[in-house]
Image (cartoon, rainbow, N blue to C red):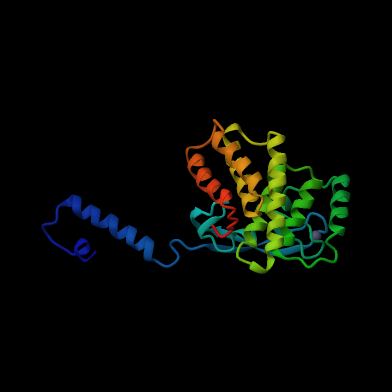
Amino acid sequence: MLFIFSENKNTPKKFTQMKKLLLILFLMITTSGAFADTYYQDSLKCPLCDKIFEITEMGSMSSFGSTYDFQKQGAVGDYYKLMVKSCPCCRFSGYTSDFLNFSNHSDTINLIKHALVKYDTIEMTDITECELAADLYKCLGRSKANIGQLYLNASYLLRSDSTKTNQRIQMQDSAAVFFIKALSMEEFAPNQIATIEYLIAEMYRRTGKFEKAIVYYDKAINNKEQADWIKEIATKQRILAIKEDDNNEI
Ligand SMILES: [Zn+2]
């Protein structure tokens, strides 16, 4: 590095330009905040009870790859925790867009109020917010893929909590159920199907259902519309299923 940044008046122009580029890259990597996750405060109005409450939104983040079940890694901070918002008054829960684009048809409101009763006495956590949002999505007839995604997000939040393994497995089971329903209802484009088959396989492997996992790894591997990376990754993960390895850390 000393050589690259040393000054020399005879340095060719091209090399000087390269130095500048390297300096910019160096500053991007070392400057505090360049790859950090940022947040901002905002407010939301609950469409059900009109309560206005403060929320924290993600401004930016930098993800570098993901786990084998697609959880973003890197400077992602509380990205998954902040996704689902919950009204502190009536507990209506969902993504910010669900608060902003709510259809206040009386039938919809009645269905939602009925679904919320179950949560009256339950302590709200990041996990129950996802579960409640998933229940509301069921009432609202939202896509099975969106419901599966909420359970998948909840499983990410439980990844490193060894005291809540059963709850994590429950979330992954539910994610698998809804992704399978989504496939049967043809909710995905043909070129997305292998990715979902692979994800279902991962849910089964992580919950110790190795035979079912292998069935779905094989579906993904043999899918003619698979993306290039699927065959390699699914084949690698399939070996774990054969070894009955339910590692959820990866
Ligand atoms: Zn509310």
Task: Report the residue that reaches farthest toward the top.
Answer: 224
Pick the front one: 228 or 48: 228
Q: Residue at x 76, y 61 (%)?
A: 87
User: Residue 131 falls in which quadrant of the image?
Assistant: bottom right
Residue 146: x and y in percent read 69, 46
Task: Report the residue that reaches farthest toward the left.
Answer: 10
Pick the front one: 160 or 38: 160
Q: Quadrant of the N terminus?
A: bottom left
Count of labels shown?
A: 0
Q: Is residue 123 above or below residue 145?
A: below
Pick the front one: 203 or 67: 203
Task: Report the residue that reaches farthest toward the front.
Answer: 243
Residue 239: x and y in percent read 53, 48
Q: Quadrant of the C terminus?
A: bottom right
Residue 193: x and y in percent read 61, 36
- Residue 196 visible in image: no
72 displayed left or right of 144: left
147 displayed left or right of 221: right
Q: Is residue 238 above or below residue 75?
A: above
Q: Is residue 28 above or below residue 223?
A: below
Q: Residue at x 55, y 46 (%)?
A: 238
- Residue 48 visible in image: yes
Which quadrant contains ligand 1?
bottom right
Residue 96: x and y in percent read 68, 54
